[in-house]
Amino acid sequence: MPPSSALFRTLKAQDSLLFEVGFNNCDITQFENLVSEDFEFYHDKSGITATKADFIAGIRDGLCKMNYKARRELVENSLEVYPMENKGVLYGVIQTGSHRFMRLKT
């Protein structure tokens, strides 16, 4: 999907809200508002988180309770968006990209 497409721009904006606001500032409301009820998260280290509730609990009880501040930055121009369609009807999107995680002192 080209970066100029409306779907790509929408996903990039939502990614920014989820990570720049939600993850980087531990703002759980961003996750509650942006993550769909049928959300699935596939992590390269810990595997599948199959529900929205489990994902949010992991953020709230893990990320937000660490003894340091975590920060995530998307690597510029690494975001890729792949629409999933059934007979021409969009039903989902796969988003991938490279990012850097940092451990900041509090």
Image (cartoon, helix red, strand yellow):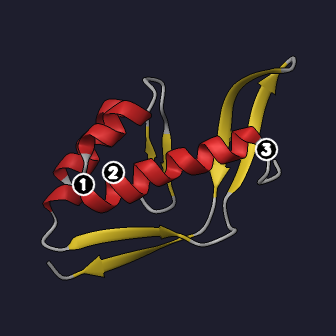
Residue 56 coordinates in the image, percent (x, y): 29, 40
**Mark 3 to mark 2 CA distance (whole Å):** 25 Å
With 89 as the anchor, is 92 left or right in this view? left
Cβ–Cβ under 8 Å for marks 2 and 1: yes
Residue 54 coordinates in the image, percent (x, y): 30, 37
Q: Residue furthest right?
A: 87
Residue 10 coordinates in the image, percent (x, y): 62, 41
Q: Which residue is mark 3?
A: 5
Instruction: Identify the residue shown where x is 64% and y is 55%.
Output: 96
Q: Which residue is mark 2?
A: 22
Q: Secondary structure at mark 1?
A: loop
Query: Which of labels 3 and 2 is toward the front?
Result: 3
What is the three-letter code of the residue carrying label 2? Answer: Gly
Residue 79 occupies which quadrant of the picture? bottom right
| Residue situated in front as seen by the camera: 57 or 36 | 36
Sequence order check, earlier mark of 3 and 1: 3
Disc 3 residue crowd, few under 14, some 14–19, many 20+, Cα 10 Å = few
Cβ–Cβ under 8 Å for marks 3 and 1: no
With 87 as the anchor, is 43 left or right in this view? left
Instruction: Identify the residue shown where x is 77% and y is 54%.
Output: 3
What is the three-letter code of the residue carrying label 3? Answer: Ser
Q: Secondary structure at mark 2?
A: helix
